[in-house]
Image: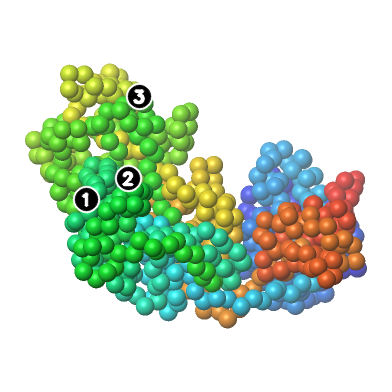
Amino acid sequence: MKRIGVFVCHCGINIAGTVDIKRVVEAVKNFPGVVYVEDYKYMCSDPGQNLIREKIKSEKLDGVVIAACSPTLHEKTFRNTVSQAGINPYNCEIANIREQCSWVHTNMEEATEKAIRIVKSIVAKTLLDESLVPIKSPVVKRALVVGGGIAGIQAALNIANSGYEVVLVEKEPSIGGRMAQFSETFPTLDCAQCILTPKMVDVASNENIKLLTYSEVVDVSGSVGNFKVKIKKKAKSVDYEKCTGCGICVEKCPVKVPNEFDRGMSERKAIYTQFPQAVPNKPVIDRENCTYFQKGKCRLCERVCPFGAIDFEQEDEVIEEEVGAIVLATGYELYDVSNMGEYGGGELEDVIDGLTFERLLSSSGPTSGEVRRPSDGKVPKTVVFVKCVGSRDPEHHFPYCSKVCCMYTTKHAMLYKHRVPDGKAYIFYMDVRTAGKGYEEFYQRAQEEDGVIYLRGKVSKIYKSDGKLIVDGFDTLTGRKVQVEADMVVLAMAIRPSSGAEKLFNLLKVSTDANGFLTEAHPKLRPVESLTAGIFLVGCAQGPKDIPDSVSQANAAASMISVMFSQDYLIHEPIITGVNEDLCSGCGICVAVCPYDARKINREKGTVEVNEILCEACGACAAACPSGAAQQKNLTDRQIISMIKAILEE
């Protein structure tokens, strides 16, 4: 029988405040297999770890149970500790008596009894643990970045500049993302294009970056270090090897359709370049609106192209890339204004969202930077800005704060006053959140220097009367109803995950929260990692955030990937769900339920075999196996039964 040592942590008062540590120590002393028990105030501290190492040697322990906090936090710490003392790290187990015990109880008697039973169950498990050896796998030193906004661009550049190849996939014809649509950025009012365009050009010129625009990921297999990714390159109908981007084809095309980049406020051609600073700065043909593709006529662009670059026969192409890590930088979109019927969203032409207002402010926008109403092109003399539209509204829309609305609404009002000095800008707000360097000062400047009027309260209704937009609200500071006659209303709509992102997330088997944003492995300690090893999340794919936070996350993800690629091998946890071939009938039930495609039937043997690199030990196969052939290492049926007996034992 193993010689088990149990070390009980006080965790300050996190555990000791609810659990009687001395009683736990006394109760566990006589449990079968336990030869040594000790408690310490902070077991994860350096003295605590030294204590464990010393007792392993002096008491000749070959198994260790740490009664402390969640294994998510410190399992790796303690396994390294016992390994340094000569014990196989997989003979070290964590009894979670904090999150699963002390934190969920107020009655000390009940919490103490529960803690004793938890510790005994983990001792019973440890007695049957195997000594395991980590699995080594080679790593493909190449990364995939999905999304070409500022977060994806920054991640791609950092990885590439570290000497590793990057495949950057963007679904639009150009990289740049939402930031390319902005006018200025807060709080410095830098020109968005001026700070973004150099990075876009760097991506195109970096020899380590393979740029795939107008493309999307359609399939992913493999695991960390060895992903196989299928990417569909949509037909551009233009040969980029021949095209010089001269623009003659765009100029001559007779078809005009609403320009999505300008939020429908301008027109583009059926063959078009997305915006003047686009990268690559070459056109694509929109087949849904092209006369030739719809009616078999025209081909004018082909006739006028001096380089013979138009290729109507071009087809979608699926290519396969091998990568070791994946960065998800899929960005965001705004909640549609049509969802706000009480504000006239979708019906009143001069009720627009913040991104539409950005295009009005932009020098490359539909009005060349002049603020004009979409309905008649006149300069609005009174503009009302409404914050938290769809955000912080759990009853009707979304419960979360979209984080950047306070600041970009302040920016919008300030820029409006710069463009229309004699205009009036009102902001309806619930409260103002300025959590960033220079943000509070920016907010104060809007009020003091630019004369923006803030009204604390929520807008109840917006409607049109006598050619004016009537904004009904309630000022909670004065306790009075407020009514403002406006020429234009700008709604700070909730930030939502990008359309199509859910399909990609399901493909990659990465988890999302209740609102559709990617879930990080740990909100504080692993903020850019997903729960699927090798997949990282940056920017607004993980949740609403501003440009500095998006860039910081991109830098962090790139740093972690560079560290990963600096190794010749990756280490995979050996706790996988194997197959007992003597019991396996080859029925294939486990193959069907495996979410990681880690299992397949060996037709020659008539049994199932496991790709240990792909297996994440989720246990789905073990639960489904009718013969008990699928057993998770160090969590076998025998161990589970032993743990249950220990818990029930009086």
Image depth: mark 2 or mark 3 in front: 3
The answer to whether marks 3 and 1 mark residues whose Cβ atoms lie closer than 8 Å is no
273 to the left or right of 551: left
Residue at figure coordinates x 67%, y 66% from the top left: 614
Name the outermost residue toward the left: 422
Q: Which residue is mark 1?
A: 254
Q: Which residue is mark 2?
A: 434
Q: Residues within 10 Å of mark 2 (few under 14, many from 20)?
A: some
Q: Where does the image place residue 161, in percent across and percent down from the top left?
A: 38, 76
State yes or no: discs 2 and 3 in contact (Cβ < 8 Å): no
Q: Residues within 10 Å of mark 1 (few under 14, many from 20)?
A: some
Q: Residue furthest bottom?
A: 568
Quadrant of the image containing the C terminus: top right
User: Dot 3 corresponds to which residue?
Assistant: 342
Q: Quadrant of residue 212?
A: bottom left
User: For the residue marked with disc 1, what is the amino acid?
Assistant: Pro
- Where disc 1 sits, the SS reads loop
Q: Residue at x 18, y 56 (%)?
A: 251
Q: CA distance from mark 2 to mark 3?
A: 28 Å
Q: Secondary structure under badge 2?
A: loop
Return the residue nearer the eye: 362 or 293.
293
Above or below, 195 against 362 in this view is: below
Instruction: Tell me if residue 408 comes above or below residue 639 in the rendering.
Output: above
- The quadrant in which the N terminus is found is bottom right
Q: Is residue 16 visible?
A: no
